[in-house]
Image (spheres, rainbow, N blue to C red):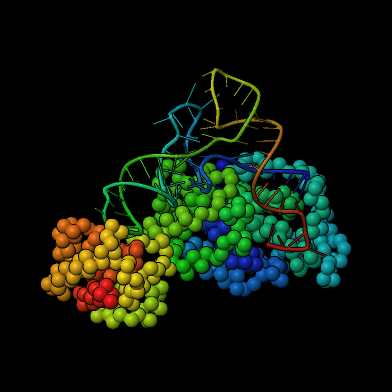
Amino acid sequence: MPDENKKIRTRFAPSPTGVLHVGGARTALFNYLFARQNSGKFILRIEDTDTERSKKEFEKDILKGLKWLKLDYDEIYHQSKRTDIYKKYLQKMVAGGFAYKAEENKEGTGKIIRFKNPNIKIKFNDEIRGEIEFNTTELGDFVIAKNEEIPLYHLAVVVDDFEMGISHIIRGEDGISNTPRQILIQDAIGALRPVYVHIPLILGADRSKLSKRHGAVSVNEYCEQGYLPEALINFMAFLGWNPGDEREIFSINELIKEFSLKKIQKSGAIFNIDRLNWMNSEYIKKMDADNLAKLCLPYLKDKIRNSKIKFANQEEYIKKIIKIEQKRINKFSEVGEGVDYFFERPKYEKEKLLWKDENDLSKTKSHLEKITELLSVLDENNFMSQNIKETVWGYAEEQGKGNVLWPFRMALTGMERSPDPFTIAEVLGKEETLSRLKIAKLKIEA
RNA sequence: GGCCCUAUCGUCUAACGGUUAGGACAUCGGCUUUUCAAGCCGAUAAUCGGGGUUCGAUUCCCCGUGGGGUCACCA
């Protein structure tokens, strides 16, 4: 148990050698939650000591992703700007006999610095795994810097965590094997040992660590596809953590309140996009119409521009479509899928107008004529789904619902699967609905 | 391969050593001879194997096995 009075400080320390994927974002989230829960500080540290592999574009991606997820940090550091600090420790370690200069480095820019391994057993406590023991003999005299100016990962991490007063190191399970080296360095520089929390990894479909190969895309791509940050946060939190009861939907504030290191899972979790989709759809269903319309609109732009339908009131028309789609879509990018009939007249074979239990097209034609007749008397301003349904329903029940409603729907959409014809007719409006019914009729006659 | 971590439905997971092993996603079916969806209801589906400890192990211990991670002058 950490000292009650000790300031909680956590950090997320990505290296900008790749995008921010869900694995990294989830690590950031857990650090964020724990810091906020304890009125502590959440620190972002860009580990860009490797100038070869570090790229500004990746750093931008990471920053952008954290911002989108609203995981705001209290302090930010770049290791590339801290070489003087590392140098100081390096010199101290060499002077103290904890490290020594060895052979010339590969670039020929000075001598590498090796840590003088005391070859001891290191025991440390992990908050979620308990005691872990390593024999450091197998580590050898590992390299901690390419030269005094160029520190390597282990040295930089330990110095920074110490200098920044990090109380809890919450990181991926892949950090476990790095821990003994880091503890060795800690002891050498007289640093306090932080609390270690190694969280389980997020795995790809093939059970291996998330990497570029299987869906380790930037969280920003989830943004582009129309996922809500709140949904992604909720989803990621439940990968390796749960509240212990059966609740599933948690806002960030609820997470902050209920998050607990003790309830973190020990084994890895496979990233399951179906579950993310479901969760996102839950959040979409709760959105108000205006906000939803605003966020969906970009995904409809092309269809609107190329539309062959003339809109009486485009804004209303699109809003109605989005309202219909709200129940259906998992993410905003799906809003335009399978709704082409709202933007152009459907194309279909006349045989499609036949309900499965019917084989007489002339009957289908008379049904279409009857629907046309019934709808003609409806006032344009009353051309609402409910009214349309009431107008047609009696006839449909009398003739067999499938016999009447299937061709009605087919005439409007040309699709075997779509929303019901009443809803669609309302959106299309009286004029367009009647036109499509007429086209269907002519098709049969032809 | 060495070292380390780990093991409940297909997936995410719940279960003070005593439960008909629970929930969610996905799948399938019903409400519904109008469809997609939503909703409600229902179904299929799991404690890796072997030894212990115990009156009793999903739970504790050991050994296997499976899975993962890590073994750079990367982070």
Is B37 or A20 nearer to us in this picture?
A: B37
Instruction: Describe residue A167's horizontal placement relative to residue A441 as left or right.
Output: right
Q: Residue at x 59, y 70 (%)?
A: A59
State whether residue A162 appears in this view: yes
Q: Where does the C terminus of chain A fall, quadrant-wise?
A: bottom left
Vertical comparison of A394 with B9: above or below: below
Q: Residue at x 66, y 60 (%)?
A: A160
Residue A23, given in percent of the width and then of the height, sits at 57, 57
Q: How many marks?
A: 0
Residue A125, given in percent of the width and then of the height, sits at 64, 43
Corner quadrant of residue A13: bottom right
Is A50 or A332 nearer to us in this picture?
A: A332
State whether residue A320 appears in this view: no
Q: Residue at x 71, y 41 (%)?
A: A133
Residue A405, given in percent of the width and then of the height, sits at 24, 62
Residue A208, given in percent of the width and then of the height, sits at 63, 53
Instruction: Describe residue A196's horizontal placement relative to residue A104 as left or right.
Output: left
Is A31 or A100 nearer to us in this picture?
A: A31
Vertical comparison of A264 with A143: above or below: above
Is A11 or B60 nearer to us in this picture?
A: B60
Vertical comparison of A246 with A29: above or below: above
Q: Residue at x 43, y 68 (%)?
A: A333
Q: Where does the N terminus of chain A fall, quadrant-wise?
A: top right
